[in-house]
Image: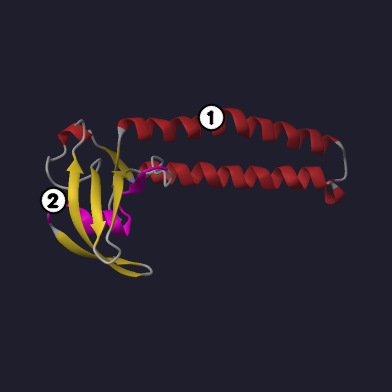
Amino acid sequence: MDRQPITREGYEKLAAEVKRLEQDEMPKIAEKIAEARAEGDLSENAEYHGQREAQGMLQAKINQIKGKLAGCHIVDKADMPKGVVTFGSTVTIKDLDLDEEETYEFVGPGEENYDGPVMKILTNSPIAQGLMGKKPGNRVEIELPKGSMSVEVVKIVDHGD
């Protein structure tokens, strides 16, 4: 698996979330498990079993975030090439079939956001992968899970512009 680019801010945000979950949330659950265990018979103790399940789900979330972090490498957007679509670019494309423009910013894990006028999408998404290295005026056919789309790169806003 290729390692995904991520900004230092994105990396630190995910790392802070892991720390919060491990140092704040896990101890709270452990305390509730201890309280439930003190109530006696565990076989019929719904609170105990519920807290054990919550603990398992929290650990799974921690592992998932740590997995994301392990699969990333920190990139300074200022070091990325200018004038071509790369990690950190904000690119406006025209869907040639629908005659509509859409704007995307290509981001790392934990930084994605699909709301707003500029959708922040992962660099390993099909749209981002199809546009990487392209320049304004380039036309490309992008394979998507639900078919394909023909687009033209209208504009690239480089990092820091």
Residue that lies at the very extreme toward the bottom in this rendered image: 147
Magenta span of residues: 116-137
Give the residue displayed 15% in from the left and 53% down from the top: 134
Between 142 and 50, the one lying in front of the other is 142
Q: Secondary structure at mark 1?
A: helix
* Residue 159 on image: x %, y %: 21, 35
Which comes before the other along the chain, label 1 or label 2?
Answer: 1
Give the residue displayed 79% in from the left and 33% down from the top: 35
138 over 105 or under it: above or below: below
Whether 140 is among the magenta residues is: no
Instruction: Name the residue carrying label 1.
Output: 20
Classify 10 Å Cα crowding around label 1: few (below 14), some (14-19), many (20 and above): few
Instruction: Name the residue carrying label 2.
Output: 136
Q: Which amino acid, mark 1?
A: Arg
* Residue 80 on image: x %, y %: 16, 38
Point out which mark residue 129 bears.
none
